[in-house]
Every structure is written in C-alpha cells, then in structure tokens.
Image (cartoon, helix red, strand yellow):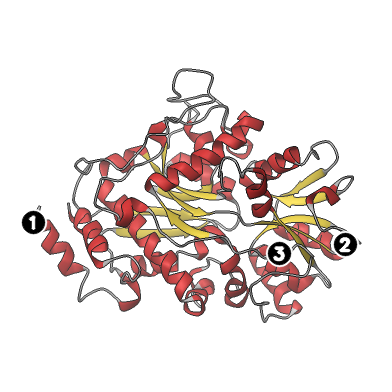
Amino acid sequence: MDSFVKAAQSSLSSESHERCKPRAISRRAFVGAAAACASAAALGLTACAEETPAGDGSGGVSGTLAPEDRELMGSPDACDVRVGYIMGPPSMGLSQVMLAGREGTTFNRYSFEIIGVDYSTLAARFNQGDFDIVTLPSNLGPIIYNNHEVNASPRVICLNNLGVLYVITTDPSITELTDLSGRTAYAYGEGGTPEYTIEYLLHKAGLSDSVNVAFKSTPFEILNFLQEEENAVAILPQPFVEVAKLLVPNLLVPIDLTEEWDYYNQDTGSQTVTTATLVTKEFLEAHEQAVIEYVALCQYSVQFTAENLDEAASYQEELETFLSNDIAKAAIPECSIVATSGVTMYKQLSGFLEALYSLNPDSIGGALPGDEFYWMPPTGYLEGDGVLEGASHVSAADGQGGGGQGDQAEVSSDEAEQLIQKMTE
C-alpha cells in the first residue's frame, strides 16, 4: 500500500494544475483519497422494491449508519469513469471536477456528458448502462432502486443541491403560499423532486385541492406564460428564475419554497434535497477508489465555487453547465450547491425521502430504500468522512416580491432570448 500512496502523492503534486488543487479540503484528506485511488413515468419504472427491509415500507432506514472501518472494495488500478449531468444547478458547482478530468490531473480517467435539462433521459441512459455516475433529482434514485427490472441498482454517494425552487409572478398580491389558493401555477419537474416538493408543501398548507399545478416539459414554456399571461404564477428552480427576471418586466420572487419546507419541518429538521449523485452498485464494488476520488473532487469544486464565484462562473459556457456566465454568476449563490456524503448525506436525504413517502409513496417508488442504498465511505478517506461544512441556502426571495440577495445578471432581454433559443435547439 505504501508504494501506492507514494505514487498517488507524486501524481497529484507537481503535475496538478493549480486550480485543481484542494483548498478548504485538507491536503492530507485529498492525498488520502488519491492514495485510495492508487489502491419515472418517463423512465417506465414501477414501484417494485429490490431490497426493502421487512415491514410496511415506512421505515427502510435504521438511523445507525456511519463511516465504515474496512478495506476498499474493488481494484486499486486507475479506471475509466463515465459521468452524466444535466445543465443547471446539478452541474454548475462542479467546474473544477470537469476541468481536472479534462486536463488529466486526476488519477482515474473521467469523461463527462451533459444531457440538456432533460433529467428523464439521463436517468434512462443511466439505467441502460451508459454512465457509471450521474446526478439526478433526489427521488429518482429510490425509484430506480425500488424496481427489480432495472439494471443500475444505484447507490447514493453525494448530495448536490438543497432547495432551489421559487414562486415567481407579476401579481403583487401574492406574498405567501396561501395566496396561491384558486390559482394556476405553471411548474417544471413533473416526476422529479420539484413535483413532489410542491405537492408536499401544498398539502401542509392545506392547499392541495385549491391550487392547480400545471406542469410543462421545459422551463422555457413557462417563461412564455409569464410573458404573455397577465398576473401569471410559476414555480421554477434557479437559474431559470434569473432568466425570467431578464425577460419578464416587473417580475416578483415572493416565495422561497425551501424556507416553506423548513417552516413545516421545524420539529424534524428535514431539509429539501433537490439533487443527488448516484453510482451503479457494480461500479462501486469494482472501483470504490474512483468513487472516493470523485466525491473528494466534488467537495473541492463546491468549496472553490463558493470562494471564487467570478472564476467559477466564468467556466459555465465553456463547459456547457449553463449557457450564460453572467446569469450563472447571479444564480449560483442561490442554487444551494453542496457536496455532502457520509452520515450527513444519509440524515438529510433519508429525512427528505421519509417526508415525501408519508404523503405519496409513489414519489419514491413505493418504499423507502434500505440502508444499503446509502454509501458510507471507508473511515479516513474523505475529510470529515464526507461532510462539507459551511454550505447553506441563500434565498432569492425577500418575502415581499422584491427580489433576492444576489446581484442581477448583466444580460439584456435580447441576449436572454438568444440564450433560450440556443438551449432549446
């Protein structure tokens, strides 16, 4: 093992590009990870539990998971890792991962593909075996896991985004969730985390029967309604809220659904988890060292993004994680970008899934996933056993409809229209 440690330390020192070196993550932890490296309806899925514990499906997790004192699984040799993303929040904080892979400063060989904004296509391709690692809406992992007929048999390794959803409108009378009663709200994300987060919050607010949520296939359809329909109401994630601000005069952002979730879950501490990263069970067991390196890179990239917003935003167009650096710069602080693994990942995600299950079991495939769904890293290979401290949600809403805490993107409406055209080609 010592020879592998020395080889990894050598490969990650003089040859690594400066911007791909870890900063907030300690050198010991990063080299330790590198040393280990050297050692839907749209998916056609049904609720069919794969490894669900005995019982009624309402308590699939034990609450006792912890990092494991064990040897790494699989081969210590470098391997090819196929990674799939969708455009927007799931990939906007991972520029440093993609740059490191492209520049060859990683131990393993990473390739990346971004599948527009269509997460159902990415999930289907993951199930078909096109990717080893993907980032998807957090409820899709359990749906895939709970189905006997799929191939991926996923394990969740990292959280990527907490809350990103906002109510936006041109109607100044809407200032709180109950004001949506009797209204239609256009939304994006049917079958994914957005749909079930919205469903949960309307139920908690007593609005399930009084708000018509009309889902559209892309965020850009919703922008058309906001432009053409007087006092239209929509529910969109960042960074599309920022795009809407550029295209819709007098647009208001009165309600942050993350804050609403926190309000209704004060007793449990459950948090909104919008996206999570999955790996196939087969790949994890064959190449755990590559999974550890990937998560360590994600942690560094998220920390880099938080501390170097201008530079991180400058890579978005080049990497196609978003097609406007200016809009990305305004939106990134409000996308709740994290890179959390280990025990904290387990607590946050299991709590979120339990909340969705309590209202609609089908939202997560009919049963809570068992403990084996949550990957626990071997002790000592990730800083803090996979927890990235200091990441928090920054709201784009002020409760009065006036706008958020970030800077307005310096993009004209014509440029925004061109952006939308490019993204929908």
Q: Left or right: 150 with respect to 20?
A: right
Q: Left or right: 415 with respect to 128?
A: right
Residue in the foreground of this view, choosing between 281 and 254: 254
What is the spatial separation of the Cα atoms under label 3 and label 2, in whole angstroms? 15 Å
Residue in the foreground of this view, choosing between 2 and 400: 400
Q: Which residue is mark 3?
A: 397
Ranked by sequence position, the earlier of labels 2 and 1 is 1
Q: x and y percent of residue 329 in the render?
A: 58, 74
Q: x and y percent of residue 269 in the render?
A: 55, 44
Q: Is residue 425 visible?
A: no
Q: Residue furthest top?
A: 55
What is the spatial separation of the Cα atoms under label 2 and label 1, in whole angstroms? 65 Å
Q: Nearer the viewer, mark 2 or mark 1?
A: 2
Q: Quadrant of residue 334?
A: bottom right
Check disc 1 and give the amino acid type.
Answer: Asp
- At 67% from the left and 65% from the top, the residue drawn is 396
